[in-house]
Image (cartoon, coloured by chain):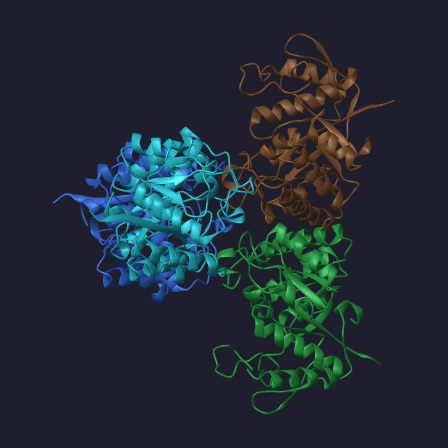
Chain colours: A cyan, B blue, C brown, D green
């Protein structure tokens, strides 16, 4: 059987006159795009252009909803009720879905952004609200998050397909969680190491934790960044390495 | 054949801690609701609650998109490109559509708000952008606007069903346009007169202009307001008078 | 020596077309107003009108800065860096100060709003940032907060005058802190009891805690509300009772 | 007598995670900075950093207020009442003034941004509202705008000092107004020509219009841009040319 993995990236985060991210470059290398929905980043014009860009590059589109905090780019925790969050997520997914469908595309997935992503990994109520919002809009949408999180449990409870997301450039603890950015060894700075780790995650379902122990992982989609030239170069290299090792890069909906 | 007309009202214009409009009252008397979409008014929580309120009262739901100007309540002209407007409208319709569909409702119509409504009545480019946005999201959506406007032409060009909106409380010129609010005779303050005029518009397709001439009108939907107790009382009275005169109040989609 | 106390209320929280609070009523009874600055509530037009209203009623004006969260009315905790908060506070005070000075008034005080007020009571870094922001704009500004909080310590460290705020309608713990709203006995619902407690706080500097113990308090300013008719009535009654008992209602700057 | 001219540039237009403009570069060459105030661009954190940057580079600071339209970068006409505009301007100036004064700087001037600048050039009511707002905050503030505009008249009527702004890269009509960007000859693309024209404007008070006629101009401050490397290079070259020709670059307040 052919091995497949998805590469995803956050794009469409420009706003008005403000440009951010090398979207035109990174869409050449990924198979799925998480498109900002106007709360933490993005605006309707940017969303429409980004959907068209994804269509031209045969990249599957997903919604990337976040906190209503443009000034903080959705990276600051906000203590919002689960009920309000559910409405905020439906709103954002709905807006992006309209752009996708108006261009003949089907919305593939939903991945929350920044602080909301992090909070939903550990807060069950929040995770449930998000999963219910996704299911309320379209029960065929795939929920993207890290494995073994409150978000995964909530997605499964809501009957959603779930895509396990892994990070090429992050070290992990023996329990599979990410090493916090507070610690000096949170990031993997060497590209070759990062590529080798991803290859092993995809092909063997294993990765080495910071203490040297071997951890089981399921890697459905690998998060890559497009905010600077090195990041894009890394994504290109990762894609090449995966393909040379017999792994096909494909949108998550094609194999989940 | 049974005579039918739709009664519509703008609702869901509250925002966060701010309450505006007597939504719970007015939904008892109308057949269609124009729900604000978060740009000039409304927020995701309000939108969801408003959709549920409409469902309970068997009121058909429509999107009420406006300018991105919460501080001005969408009542101030903005010089936004047609291309941007198209994206703004798709965004807002999409968001509301997601709430409607997540509660098992079908979005019925789109009526633009305030300054956007007025500008689209005379600006062909803007009207085309709006019509194309509506059609892009769902070509079965009904476009609501005044007759003989750029908006009507644009809707027909885009292949959309069109609902002619009339106003119970406004005088009209011999050419069918509204008497501008700049003039003292813009408004009809006497409720009985207003009701009689609506009855004649619906039953005979005629109305008297300010110069005494008789003007042909097509009245698919009558706009009523819910922002104060007298307005709600008027709507209740209008509904009663219509029903007593053999006119059925029904959502526009049931007869257009 | 004449006994004096200040009565303060949060006003100017309307926004655009949205009206909230009975500002015209409550300003008749208070001596100081905390005016929203456009982040959690208020807009420039409302701010200017509110300053003029205070001037006409001889009410001293203060800034009421909050989190940048209009949708949540500043009532939701946000995890914003102390450095950013300092800039947010300077911005908001500066904006209100310009309205005050353009009408010939001197800005008297600063009291933070909602979630920011609560967080600054216990978070030293946040409290320091706020105190430094106030001092940076004008070291003669009075900082208003509850006694024995991180905010009081920070204000004193920054060399600011400090006004101890007490609440007429809240029970307190033996340590002087408010009984959390999570508990059924958080609020004092009987007006007469509330008035008697305030009188004793002002005249004797003592109040009874929920366990019956007597607690020392310093009451420089009493917070009253103007969001509903009963609240306004309570404020009027409290003012009357204080005056009848020989306590003069005066802006905090006149005695601090 | 020593010839002096001011060079001004719009800076501080970044917002949250969004960077725009080469502020660190352009401040080396200008004598006055127009700092965005959070409506069309800028946020409190950016404003504070920008004020500090100006202080380090001995650049005089001014407020650059705009329309409340971040999504449109203040470049879209908005039909806002003069009364509201007055409050919007006071708010924005006040916010920036607080940052300036908290760092020991005096606010020097006010120059409106984008669509507001253009509209105030021809709309007397709007221009009056802006001038009154500036005077209301501080009558020593200098109003910056083009000569022979409604804004100049309004500033003079309000008793404000006025700085005539000229553009290095724009052709002008025989009546002194800018050639509209609709026409192919609106811009001057040749740097040497642009520098020569500025030199003549400053030294002789004359410039050649598009029809070859000679027009009198008063050039108090020359607007230069910092949004791309060529623009910065042009500003550096212009400054050098002016200094080599005996013209001193100095903040407008030093000679107006």
- Which is more toward the observer, D144 or B210? D144
Q: In the rendered picture of this protein, how many numbered marks are placed on residues?
A: 0
Q: Residue at x 55, y 34 (%)?
A: C77
D158 vs D65, left or right, is: right
Q: Residue furthest bottom?
A: D212
Q: Please tell me which residue is depicted at 56% across the width and 88% down the height of the picture.
A: D210
Residue pushed farthest left?
Answer: B1
**B47 or C87: nearer the eye?**
C87
Is residue B211 visible in the rendered structure shown here? no
Residue D123 position, x and y percent, is: 58, 67
Left or right: C86 in relation to C243:
left
Indicate the quadrant where residue C229 lies: top right
Is residue C223 among the parts visible in the rendering?
Answer: yes
State left or right for residue B218 relative to residue D214.
left
Residue drawn 61% across the image and 30% down it:
C118
Q: Is residue B251 above or below residue B128?
A: above
Q: Quadrant of residue A116?
A: top left
Q: In x, y percent, where is residue D118?
A: 57, 69
């Amino acid at each position: 059987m052919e091995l497949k993995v998805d590469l995803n990236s956050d794009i469409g985060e420009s706003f008005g006159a403000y440009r951010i991210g090398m979207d035109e470059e990174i869409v050449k290398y990924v198979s799925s795009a998480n498109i900002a929905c106007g709360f933490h980043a993005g605006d309707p014009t940017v969303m429409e252009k980004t959907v068209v860009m994804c269509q031209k590059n045969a990249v599957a589109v997903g919604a990337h909803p976040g906190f209503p905090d443009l000034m903080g780019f959705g990276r600051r925790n906000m203590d919002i009720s689960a009920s309000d969050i559910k409405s905020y997520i439906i709103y954002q997914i709905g807006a992006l879905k309209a752009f996708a469908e108006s261009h003949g595309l089907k919305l593939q997935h939903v991945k929350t952004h920044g602080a909301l992503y992090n909070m939903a990994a550990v807060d069950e109520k929040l995770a449930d609200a998000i999963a219910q919002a996704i299911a309320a809009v379209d029960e065929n949408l795939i929920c993207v998050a890290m494995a073994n999180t409150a978000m995964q449990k909530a997605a499964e409870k809501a009957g959603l397909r779930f895509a396990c997301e892994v990070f090429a450039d992050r070290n992990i603890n023996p329990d599979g969680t990410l090493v916090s950015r507070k610690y000096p060894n949170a990031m993997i700075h060497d590209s070759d190491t990062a590529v080798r780790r991803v290859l092993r995650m995809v092909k063997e379902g294993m990765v080495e934790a910071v203490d040297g122990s071997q951890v089981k992982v399921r890697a459905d989609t690998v998060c890559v960044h497009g905010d600077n030239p090195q990041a894009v170069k890394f994504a290109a290299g990762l894609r090449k390495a995966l393909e040379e090792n017999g792994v096909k890069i494909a949108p998550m909906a094609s194999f989940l």
